[in-house]
Image (spheres, grey):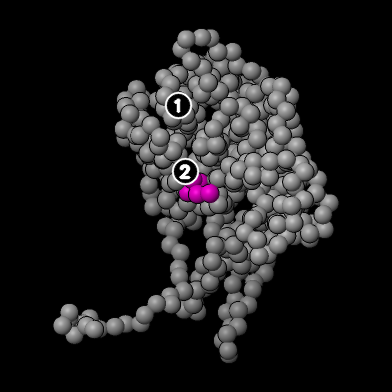
Amino acid sequence: MDAQSGANIKTAKLTLGDQSWSFPVYEGTIGPEVIDVSKLYAETGRFTYDPGFTSTGACESKITYIDGDEGVLLYRGYPIEDLAEHGDFLETCYLLLYGELPNAAQKADFVDRVIHHTMVHEQMSRFFQGFRRDAHPMAVMVGCVGALSAFYHDSTDITDPTQRMIASIRMIAKMPTLAAMAYKYSVGQPFIYPKNDLDYASNFLRMCFAVPCEEYKPNPVLARAMDRIFTLHADHEQNASTSTVRLAGSTGANPFACIAAGIACLWGPAHGGANEAALKMLGEIGSVDRIPEYIKRSKDPNDSFRLMGFGHRVYKNYDPRAKIMQKTCHEVLHELGRNDPLLDVAMELERIALHDDYFIEKKLYPNVDFYSGITLRAMGFPTAMFTVLFALARTVGWIVQWKEMIEDPHQKLGRPRQLYSGATRRDYQPMSRRR
């Protein structure tokens, strides 16, 4: 049922003392029912208190569905496993943007539109010269993506559906170029322009790893792995960065500014930096024979050590993306002929986590970050770029969520409430009377 249709089947009753109020209960197509408390304050003079919004639905959406208990992730109803195995990233972008998978003609047209928007304004290259050489690539991305609004005035009118779509295509197309420029700047190499005859992932890898003095030949196995990583990270419902994009968008801010806000939020280690933390942990363990020691430490409540890459805020089952990421990791390492000892550590940790009663009871299953760090390192990316790649992939999710919010007639300016616990009213005292 449409949560905003008004055709309510049930109500929830709130009783405080001798007063009672009823609030509508809505049912989505799948997932838990929700109690509409939007009029709670007007009717009762009270707010709900929900730190972290873990029990609050801030919007209605038709884009992504997660069932954390069952380990399910759906984009527009399609399982992530099917999209990652049988489709490609731009097909997934089309699905997220338009709601349906494209036919051959629609796919060709969409790819053509993305490819011909990959270049950024030439003056953008001067922005990079203002950053220190050792600037974190995410700092560069926050600044440069926000600066896009200074160059593309013809797609910042959020009331125009055509401009909204143009902005969406531009963001999907230009993010790989900016990400590659951030990488090249960090290693002191010249920028590489995009090539229109390459697919999305191959083009990105070329912009990252090609040099002017020799020809670059895209490796199809690595390109496919990169494309799959993009697909796995394309959207993830109302997470911290997506909520940030929606909140920024609710003010009427232009889409480039909203995406820059999402990138800044993703930069936080508790959100976008988990794969880097997982890789660091595997390196600390070092070898399989040291795993029992660290397993013991992870179970000790008095030990600060924690297993990174296990468990998830939403998933209380095996993260469906982790299975695909594990397979992708093996493909990349096999193609490159590398035997990464950290993969051996990862495999043994996974085996233990799936069979040890402690981990099963606490539902600490491997998540997508557990394998992605090893894969990206093998492909040649430094750890500082991991979150940039996450932002690149998540851009389509952010822009689609932003677009859905703008087109929602019920959307309002975001304004969370609070439980105030500070001082009550006090009289101002002149300096002479203060102790």
Question: Quick one: label 1 or label 2, which is nearer the N terminus?
Answer: 1
Residue 417, percent across and down? 45, 68
- Tell me the distance, in whole angstroms, between the alpha carbons under discs 1 and 2: 21 Å
Main secondary structure found in the magenta portion:
loop
Q: Which residue is mark 1?
A: 187
Total label count? Answer: 2
Tell me what residue is drawn at x 53 percent, y 72 percent.
48
Q: Which residues make up the magenta segment?
A: 265-269
Secondary structure at badge 2 equals helix
Question: Does the rendering let one see residue 44?
Answer: yes
Tell me what residue is drawn at x 43 percent, y 30 percent.
186
Q: Residues within 10 Å of mark 2 (few under 14, many from 20)?
A: many
Query: Along the horizontal axis of the image, is 338 left or right of 268?
Result: right
Check residue 282 for magenta coloring.
no
Callout 1 amino acid = Val
Tell me what residue is drawn at x 44 percent, y 38 percent.
136
Q: Quadrant of the C terminus?
A: bottom left
Q: Residue furthest left?
A: 432
Q: Quadrant of the N terminus?
A: bottom right
Label of residue 306 in the image: none
Label of residue 263 in the image: 2
- Tag 1–tag 2 contact (CB < 8 Å): no
Choose between 67 and 313: the one closer to the eye. 313
- Of discs 1 and 2, which sits in the foreground? 1
Secondary structure at badge 1 equals helix
